[in-house]
Image (tube, rainbow, N blue to C red):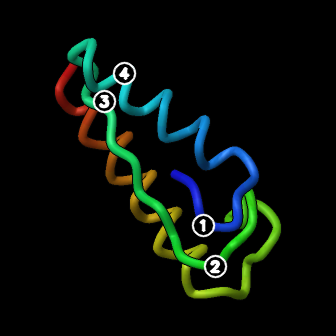
Amino acid sequence: MSSTRDLVLSATSIFGRALYEQGVDARLVVFDGLPHAFWTYMPDVPETGQANALMARFLKDRLAAR
């Protein structure tokens, strides 16, 4: 998960692509106009709720598959 104003967006994209190429179930979601790790310190923006819901669903799905 990243955002368009994240200083490490490019590196995150490269890492995500490398994981995908190795068969890892990796997904990259990019939010528009927000800084690095916005969901950790910007609780009042709607995207934080969306980001947390996406992460929770991803983890729940992976844990349920075990």
Question: Is 34 situated left or right of 17 in this image?
Answer: right
Q: Position of residue 12 (x, y in %)?
A: 56, 38
Image quarter of the C terminus: top left
How far apart marks 4 and 3 lie (CA) works out to 19 Å
Amino acid type of the residue tagged 4 in the rendering: Leu
Q: Nearer the viewer, mark 4 or mark 3?
A: 4
Q: Residues within 10 Å of mark 3 (few under 14, many from 20)?
A: few
Three-letter amino acid code of the residue under disc 3: Leu
Disc 1 and disc 2 in contact, CB within 8 angstroms: yes
Q: Which residue is mark 4?
A: 19
Q: Is residue 13 above or below residue 2?
A: above
Q: Are marks 4 and 3 in contact (CB under 8 Å)?
A: no
* CA distance for labels 1 and 4: 20 Å
**Quadrant housing residue 34:** bottom right
| Residue nearest the viewer, comparing 64 with 21 | 21
Q: Few, some or many C-alpha atoms within 10 Å of disc 4 (few <14, some 14-19, many ≥20)?
A: some
Of callouts 1 and 2, the N-terminal one: 1
Element on which disc 2 rests: loop
Q: In this orientation, which residue lies closer to the viewer: 45 or 22?
A: 22
Residue 63: assigned label:
3
Q: Measure the alpha-carbon separation of dots 1 and 2.
A: 5 Å
Label for residue 4? 1
Q: Which residue is mark 2?
A: 33
Q: Who comes first in sequence, dot 4 or dot 3?
A: 4
Q: Residue at x 45, y 52 (%)?
A: 55
Farthest residue to the top: give it: 22
Q: Earlier in the sequence, mark 2 or mark 4?
A: 4
Hey, what amino acid is under mark 1? Answer: Thr
- Give whichever of 31, 17 is nearer the camera: 17
In which quarter of the view is residue 23 placed?
Answer: top left
